Image: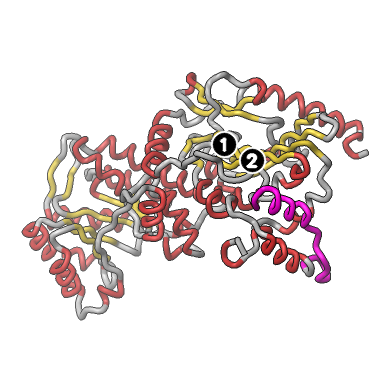
Amino acid sequence: MSGPFGLPLALLTDSYKASHAAVFPSALSATAYAEFRQPFNNDPSDHRMVFYGLQYIITTYVSRVWTDTDVDTAKAFFSTHNAGHSAFPFPETLFRKFVRENNGHFPIRIYAMREGSVVYPHTPVMQISARDEYAGLVTYLESVLLMTWYPSAVATLSRKAHTRIKERYSQSVDESAMWTLESRMHDFGFRACTCVEQSMLGGAAHLLTFAGSDTMSAAYYVQHVLNGGRPVATSVPATEHSVMTAYQSERQAVMRVLDEYGKGVVACVLDSYDYARALREVLPIVAERQVRDGGVFVIRPDSGDQVEAVLMGLQAADKAFGSTLNSKGYKVIRNASVIQGDGVTLDSLVRILDAVLNAGFSAECVGFGMGGGLLQKLDRDMMGMAVKLSSITYEDGQTRDIMKFPKQGSSKVSLPGKFSVHADAAQNGAPVAYRASHAPSDPDLLQLVYDCGPVPGHTWDSFDAVRARLDDQWTRFPKIARAVSDDLLDYQKLIHDRQEQRVNDGSAFA
């Protein structure tokens, strides 16, 4: 079989998708699109989101070559998949036709925003089309394409964390130390993931913004698959409680760690027994060694009140190691810092940083780690990603642009027609969606990434290039933008009014 995990490729969708081709209207073409319906976590003050992860979906799943064996195996599965273990309908004839006539490539065309693009609610991030007898397969791969919601959500979360940290950096960190910003949020999420694939995709999305990561699956994937061998992720030696409690005393554990790693950066968890006492009794000994050897000691609390634990660590480090006052009037601790990785969220991160600055310390004195909060505690509804049919051309040549407008669910209203997306100079280049027939003359931001098979000559951008795109656009684009052109909004209203009339007069139900 050609599919991953021993699965036939026909099963990389939801069951009901297999029944749609047989009941889809005969058509010359059909078009669907993908969008995020709402800003991340419904943030009212910042609508920017990151679109990322389609490269993996296209290369790993969509571009795979189907074979008759895939269809045979799927047929055996479908033969008992219906209620009562009877045969479930699936488009066997269409599958065998493109296996035979299209070299086994799934017969759809996909245009998409480039990886790392900053988008807004209702920006069409993908446009999918199918022609002739394959029109009914236009949304067959919707489910796997929608899985881009996950790396997009992680990338957006990390960028939002970066925005909050950067604001405090601008207030309290000298320009000469701004380079430390990209290490201020560390990925601790590998163990929180449901599978290695999730850790790789989510961890890569985090690395679009930050460089700190303990998720080596993502670090390797980014470096050697996406970035031509050029490294992005870094980490430092660090202890866990099993190391600290394996020694008779915490002092012995710390001194052994310093013997091995004390000339560089090393992190030690210090709350195995009594965090306050460890800071009071062990930290002065550490300071003597670290100052002598030139290393940096990172204090890690892992329990208690998040804000209090960080401030205790900073104050103890200031007393043991000493500090200097930077040009902005904030303390920078010598040879030491604190990392808080226990239950960090966007909200708690802000509370911690504000308390740190209010206590007189520079934001560079504290770093953060996120585990399950970064790679696991997200879902598709956080940005409301969806795929909807938007246009169909019937066999008689009549084109009907389509939109969904459930009376009881206004948040699920979709856009009608075929689209192009263009940079709006009036909004510093932010993307705006247009009707394809009424688009500006400048280049369409939706690029062909799959054309009933791999696109000849198409190459995906390097990870470095994707990082640079995200950094540029996130900095340049407004927090809230007009993402849909007035013409398209007017057209949406026109189609809505027409369809609403059909609903009201009953013809939509005839």
At horizontal 39% and vertical 32% (from top left) the residue drawn is 472
Q: Which residue is mark 2?
A: 109
Residue 210 or 418: which is nearer the viewer?
418
At horizontal 12% and vertical 44% (from top left) the residue drawn is 324
Where is residue 16 drawn, in percent x and y?
A: 75, 56
Q: Amino acid at mark 1?
A: Leu
Residue farthest right in this picture? 510
Q: Amino acid at mark 2?
A: Arg
Q: Secondary structure at mark 1?
A: strand
Residue 98 lies within the magenta run:
yes
Q: Quadrant of residue 188?
A: bottom left
Q: Which mark is residue 448?
A: 1
Real-space Cα separation, disc 1 to disc 2, in angstroms: 8 Å
Number of residues whose C-alpha sits closer than 10 Å to that of mark 2, classed few (under 14), some (14–19) or many (20 or more): many
At horizontal 21% and vertical 61% (from top left) the residue drawn is 266
Residue 4 or 379: which is nearer the viewer?
4
Q: Which mark is residue 148?
A: none
Left or right of 419, for residue 465: left
Total numbered circles: 2
Residue 223 lies within the magenta run:
no
Where is residue 41 drawn, in percent x and y?
A: 53, 45
Q: Secondary structure at mark 2?
A: strand
Here the colouring is: secondary structure
Residue farthest left in this picture? 292
Where is residue 7 drawn, in percent x and y?
A: 62, 65
Name the N-terminal-most of marks 1 and 2.
Answer: 2
Left or right of 454, for residue 99: right
Q: Quadrant of the N terminus?
A: bottom right
Is mark 1 in CB contact (under 8 Å) with mark 2? Answer: yes
Q: Which residues are magenta?
A: 81-104
- Look at the image and tell me whether residue 351 can be seen: no
Left or right of 304, for residue 88: right
